[in-house]
């Protein structure tokens, strides 16, 4: 049984996340971002963090990307 499928991430997904980062006010010093997407069957999981805190703009970018179309 094949439990995974190789899927390439659409290039527009990266540009949407980059745009969200550019529009987000940054604190002084170092800032870091994490974006996570997973799909198992029909269930999708979206997570975006900025400095280890929920980042709503990033989550919106993921949900608006071609990834969300499944």
Image: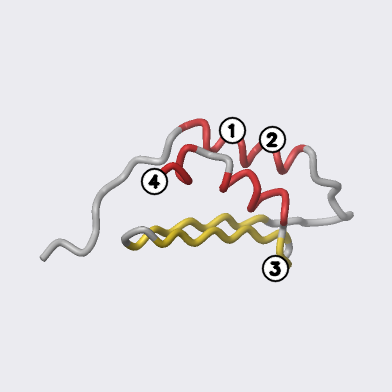
- What's the mark number on residue 52? 3
**Residue 6 vs residue 27: left or right?**
left
The image quadrant of residue 27 is bottom right
Q: Which residue is disc 2 drawn over?
A: 19
Left or right position of 31 against 3? right
| Residue at 26%, 48% in the rendered image | 6
Q: Earlier in the sequence, mark 3 or mark 4?
A: 3
> Where is residue 69 drawn, in percent x and y?
44, 42
Distance from disc 4 to disc 2, alpha carbons, whole Å, reads 22 Å
The residue most toward the left is 1
The vertical placement of 1 against 16, above or below, is below
| First of labels 3, 2 by sequence position | 2
The mark nearer the N terminus, 4 or 2, is: 2
Q: Which mark is residue 58?
A: none
Instruction: Give the labeled residue for mark 4.
Output: 70
The Cα–Cα distance between marks 1 and 3, rounded to whole angstroms, is: 21 Å
Where's residue 28, x and y in %? Answer: 89, 54
Rendering coords of residue 7 (x, y %): 31, 45
Q: Residues within 10 Å of mark 2 (few under 14, many from 20)?
A: some
- For label 3, the SS is loop
Could you say whether the residue bearing mark 4 is in a helix, strand or loop?
Answer: loop
Cβ–Cβ below 8 Å for labels 3 and 2? no
Q: CA distance from mark 1 to mark 2?
A: 6 Å
Q: CA distance from mark 3 to mark 2?
A: 19 Å
Q: Choose between 21 and 58: the one closer to the eye.
A: 58
Q: Secondary structure at mark 1?
A: helix
Disc 1: which residue: 15
Q: Disc 1, disc 2: CB below 8 Å?
A: yes
Mark 3 or 4, closer to the camera: 4
């Amino acid at each position: 049984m094949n439990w995974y499928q190789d899927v390439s991430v659409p290039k527009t997904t990266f540009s949407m996340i980059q745009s969200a980062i550019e529009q987000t006010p940054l604190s002084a010093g170092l800032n870091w971002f994490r974006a996570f997407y997973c799909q198992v069957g029909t269930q999708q999981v979206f997570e975006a963090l900025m400095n280890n805190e929920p980042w709503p703009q990033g989550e919106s970018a993921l949900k608006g990307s071609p990834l969300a179309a499944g």
